[in-house]
Amino acid sequence: QQGSEPQSSMGQGDFGPIYASNHPSGFNRVPIGSDPRGRGSASGGAVFGDPLTRIEKSITNLRSRLTKLYDISDDIDTKLFENALDIFLSFYKDNLCVDTILYDGVEQTLKSLKSDGYKLVIVTNKPYDFVKPILKGLNILDHFELYLGADSLEKKKPDPMPLLYVANKFNIDINKCVMVGDSKNDIIAANKANMQSIGVSYGYNYGEDILTYNPTLKVDSFSDILKSFRS
């Protein structure tokens, strides 16, 4: 993944993946303590209309939601912050996938997991209105059954609410779900939800070792996740 901002292990930054499955093998086959290599993707959400049209129509509401989602320092002028956010959102809307590519093995791994019967969902702290255009731009939208953004539910990662929501929506036991992430928020959320997790050693984790947050497994490459699930 290459780009102008910190990137997630799958593509453009901060997608925390979940694999949920009614597949006969479930996720109990992920060997605790082993070192498979790979990463998947998680998602939850609703259906978009035309991506750019929807973003343009909802930009005011999105700005309002973002203002509420993130703590603003008391010494920052509110109007200045809102103006800066307007500029950022406008620019970001037009540059969602500029200089952004998938890591090696991501697309084939997603195809294989889906073929094996796994449900693929994305839970991200990125604003909801940006999720579908990014997935579409990376040509992986069709692999996912659901996607959730930071503003989809009352709480976002590292709170476990989005992960529990996804498991409940698909009526899949937590023990048969795996959260795959490159950020402490992904692993903390999984641990709070009592969900297995795979932490990747690259991506979005602010320069910290993902092992600090106790994932079930740590991996270095996306594609080897298949070896873990099939072993």
Image: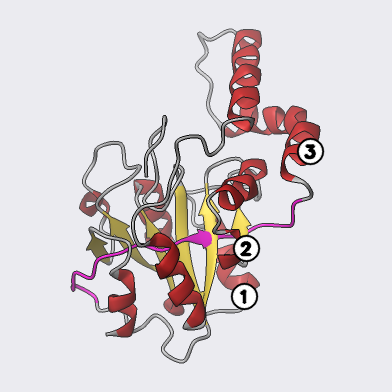
- The CA distance from mark 1 to mark 3 is 30 Å
Q: Position of residue 26 (x, y in %)?
A: 43, 84
In this rendering, the answer to whether 165 lies above or below 188 is below
Q: Position of residue 60 (x, y in %)?
A: 76, 27
Earlier in the chain: of badge 1 and badge 2, it is 2
Of 86 and 197, nearer the camera is 86
**Residue occupying image coordinates x 35% and y 65%:** 197
Residue 170 numbered mark, or none: 1
40 is within the stretch colored magenta: yes
Q: Secondary structure at mark 2?
A: strand
Q: Type of residue at label 1?
A: Phe
In which quadrant of the rendered view does residue 215 lie?
bottom left
Earlier in the chain: of badge 2 and badge 3, it is 3
Q: Secondary structure at mark 1?
A: loop
Mark 2, Cα crowd under 10 Å, few <14 / some 14-19 / many 20+, is many
- The CA distance from mark 2 to mark 3 is 20 Å
Q: Type of residue at label 3?
A: Thr
Please state if 156 lies on the left or on the right of 34 as rendered.
right
**Residue occupying image coordinates x 43% and y 78%:** 175
Q: Type of residue at label 2?
A: Leu
Residue on which disc 3 sits: 53
Q: Secondary structure at mark 3?
A: helix
In this rendering, the answer to whether 46 lies above or below 194 is above
Residue 116 numbered mark, or none: none
Asked if labels 2 and 1 touch by Cβ distance under 8 angstroms, the answer is yes
219 is within the stretch colored magenta: no
> Which span is picked out in magenta?
32-48
**Residue occupying image coordinates x 61% and y 20%:** 85
Residue on which disc 2 sits: 146
